[in-house]
Amino acid sequence: MKTWIGKHYAFLLCSALLMLACLICLSLLIRNNKQSEELALADNTSIDTEETSTSDVLEPEQLEIVEILIISEFDDLIKENASKYGFDWMLISAQIYAESSFKPEVTSVVGAMGLMQIMPSTSRWLGTNPELLVKPEVNIQLGCYYNRKIYIGIHNGVIEEEKLTLMLASYNAGPNRVKRLRKKYGDWDEIEPHLPSETRTYVTRIWNKYKEYLGLL
């Protein structure tokens, strides 16, 4: 009888211990799951806070996408010299496009050379060896310098766009011819019909290309 009671007591004790162990394991599992959920919630809250604070701190202009316009491989040279002589680099780029389509090795049938199609006689007049006109850095610098000399030779009182138009026409047809026509006819609208068709086309082509470049910004 005592043996049976002892065995029964041992069975109950083992059952109780097993149940206690199961309860402990279940409690640990529930606590771990709760901690994982809390960590996940904390991570999500941190991300949301960071996103909100970023958009709150940045100014509208800092959120804009900056577009960089690339016209040709000579952009840096054009920008440097256009700035030096007081011109919009995109206008000079449009002029170079009309002159040579950005081909530095081009020589015209009349002997104009390089990117800005400068005549050897003009190069010598401006104090530069014509043999150097094949170098883009020399050609662009000399072309912009020539533009500047023409530009400052146009009397004040002319609106900027017309002054630039007269400069471009003079670059193509020659400053003296345009000066004579201005003296005889006055403003650009009266001068234009008396210019060679090549010059009229040249000026129009440059302004159209310039507007095209502006549209890319």
Image (tube, rainbow, N blue to C red):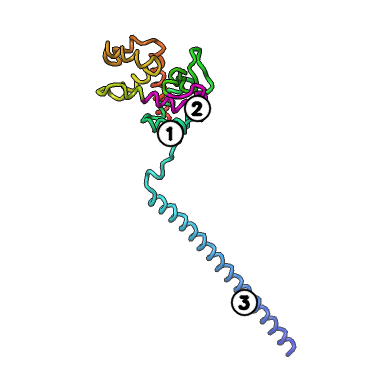
Q: Name the residue: 70% across, 83% down.
A: 10
**Position in image of residue 3 (x %, y %):** 75, 88
Left or right side of 181 for 216: right
Q: Position of residue 210 (x, y in %)?
A: 40, 25
Residue 97 in percent (x, y) is at 46, 22
Q: Amino acid at mark 1?
A: Glu
Residue range corresponding to the magenta coloring: 127-148
Q: What is the CA distance from the residue labelled 1 to the residue labelled 2?
A: 13 Å
Q: Is residue 138 above or below residue 42?
A: above
For residue 20, the mark is 3
Q: Position of residue 202 (x, y in %)?
A: 41, 16
Q: CA distance from mark 2 to mark 3?
A: 90 Å
Which label number is shown at residue 136? 2
Element marked by disc 2: helix
Q: Amino acid at mark 2?
A: Pro
- Residue closer to the observer: 163 or 180: 180
* Quarter of the rendering occupied by the C terminus: top left
Q: Cα distance, mark 3 to mark 1? A: 85 Å
Q: Earlier in the sequence, mark 2 or mark 3?
A: 3
Q: Amino acid at mark 3?
A: Leu
The quarter holding residue 125 reads: top left
Q: Is residue 54 magenta?
A: no
Mark with earlier residue (1, 2) = 1
Q: Secondary structure at mark 1?
A: helix
Residue located beneath label 1 in the image: 80
Q: Is residue 101 visible?
A: no
